[in-house]
Amino acid sequence: MHVAFRGTENIRDALSNIDVRRVDAKFQGRQVRLHSGFYRQYASIQSELRALIRQQTASREVDTIYLTGHSLGGALATIAAADVATMFPETPVHCYTFGAPRTGDAAFVHLFDQHVSSNLRVVNEDDPVPMVPISPRFQHVSNGIVIDDKGVITAAKTDLPWFVRPLLGLAYLDPSAPIRDHDCGVYIGRLGALRSPHTRH
């Protein structure tokens, strides 16, 4: 089964108006804290998604689940992957996101890494969206890669220290800052034109 989440259409508004409040959430009894806006959007389709997966796994129509999304859709895919992986532990769950913002706290990242079978978090080098929210209360899940404008890939660094985030985040919120690197078409183009299969160190 493949599940794709659509991202926002207005990137500038998403960056400047992003809500940094957190909300408690439970996945099979494990409590974590998530971005309130992202979780609210996911909660609106959570029951329907669970019911569909339950039906198809019971009938053996599905043996593996892939979740993906770009931009805010990547945040929803990340939450969904953790939810589905804990709800259906016998079914492999894989998550692939592109230009996704930070989604939850350290407890969520730990739960995600523990239960999701595999994931890849793809970031274009100058994409501003993965820099938000800049609050240290939010973290990225692991296994990130960065693609530059020459198509060279590098392993994403571990999440930035809290005191560095505001400096970079505010720079990206500048109305004059380029946001071309966040475009879904740019992601598709760079993935299709990768020049090297090797990761540069």
Image (cartoon, grey):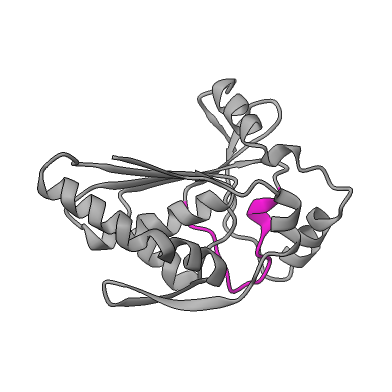
Query: Residue at the location (57% across, 47% down)?
Result: 7
Residue 74, compared with residue 45, is above or below; it is above
> In front here: 22 or 37?
37
Residue 135 part of the magenta-drawn span: yes
> In front here: 165 or 78?
78
Q: Position of residue 36 (x, y in %)?
A: 54, 72
> Residues in magenta?
128-142
Q: Is residue 115 visible?
A: no
User: In which quadrant will I find the N terminus?
Assistant: top left
Residue 20, compared with residue 185, is above or below; it is below
Toward the right, the furthest residue is 176
Query: Residue at the location (59% across, 60% down)?
Result: 159
Residue 110, compared with residue 154, is above or below; it is below
Q: Position of residue 164 (x, y in %)?
A: 74, 65
Which quadrant would residue 126 be assigned to in this image? top right
**Image-based side of 79 in relation to 92, left or right:** right
Q: Is residue 140 visible?
A: yes
Q: Position of residue 76 (x, y in %)?
A: 47, 56
Query: Residue at the location (11% across, 42% down)?
Result: 60
**Image-based side of 160 in relation to 47, left or right:** right
Q: Position of residue 176 (x, y in %)?
A: 89, 48
Query: Residue at the location (19% across, 41% down)?
Result: 62
Which quadrant would residue 194 be assigned to in this image? top right
User: In which quadrant will I find the C terminus?
Assistant: top right
| Main SS, magenta residues | loop
> In front here: 190 or 76?
76
